Amino acid sequence: MAELSKTSGIPVATIKFYLRERLLPAGERTGPNQSRYGEQHLRRLRLIRGLLDVGGLSVASARGVIDAVDSELPLAHSFGVAQRAVSADIDPGGMDPEALAGIDRLVEGWRVSADNPGRLAAARVLETFNALGQRDDRDWFSRYAAAALLVAEADLDLVEARGSREAMAETVVIGTVLGDALFSGLRRAAQEHVSALRHPVPFEPVRAPAKEQECP
């Protein structure tokens, strides 16, 4: 474990915590107080840190996602687990039916389940948008839907490039959890770029500070 800690840069106490929380599989027992850890454990540690530190998941959510990776269930199941791990728990019973219907019209032709967390989250956004008196004058929602479809195709292209079921499931998790953070970051960078193109700020040269006059 000391070598695993040194290679990964993760403290021994943290590795022991991951073992207790069943995020990291146990090593191969080689003695009464010693176990052997290999590349699989190092890879899993990197996944755990990505889920917790970048994805912002709780330990319980990360455990559920990792269990989905290790299972033999279909990839659609892994997608569902990962999506719910990064999504708010929304009760559809308390939502405006018209908002749900509006999202359903927006994604008409998509194969989306009624309890899909993305469908519910999008409906809540539409509900709030309307409550604030906003108008979709430039097809904001439909353009977001088109962008989301492109991103989903990129996600699946990345998953299908992997060979084994385990590698594909791991990429599902990484693409879903880290993909949210990636898209959010790129969206902010793109907003600054487009804003600078459409609403340029006049350039003001930097002037050197004036020298203080010496007292006579």
Image (cartoon, rainbow, N blue to C red):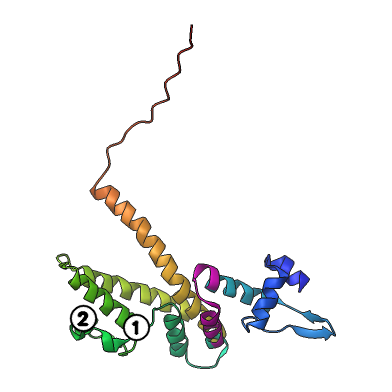
Residue 130 screen position, x and y as percent = 18, 72
- How many discs appear? 2
Depth order, front residue of 145/22: 22
Badge 2: how crowded within 10 Å, few (<14), some, or many (20+)? many
What residue is at 37 percent from the left and 76 percent from the top? 152
The numbered mark at residue 99 is 2
Residue farthest to the front, as pictured: 215
Instruction: Specify the amino acid type for callout 2.
Output: Ala
Residue 69, by quadrant, is bottom right
Instruction: Specify the amino acid type for callout 1.
Output: Ile
Examine the rendered structure and indicate whether residue 184 appears above or below residue 60. above
The numbered mark at residue 90 is 1
Magenta segment, prevailing SS (helix, strand or loop):
helix
What is the span of residues highlighted in magenta in the rendered image?
52-67
Q: Is residue 28 visible?
A: yes
Depth order, front residue of 58/45: 58
**Residue 101 belongs to magenta span:** no
Residue farthest to the right, as pictured: 31
Residue 44 screen position, x and y as percent = 62, 77
The numbered mark at residue 129 is none
Q: Quadrant of the N terminus?
A: bottom right
What residue is at 54 percent from the left and 72 percent from the top? 52
Q: Is residue 164 visible?
A: no
Secondary structure under the numbered disc 1 in the rendered image: loop
Residue 91, by quadrant, is bottom left
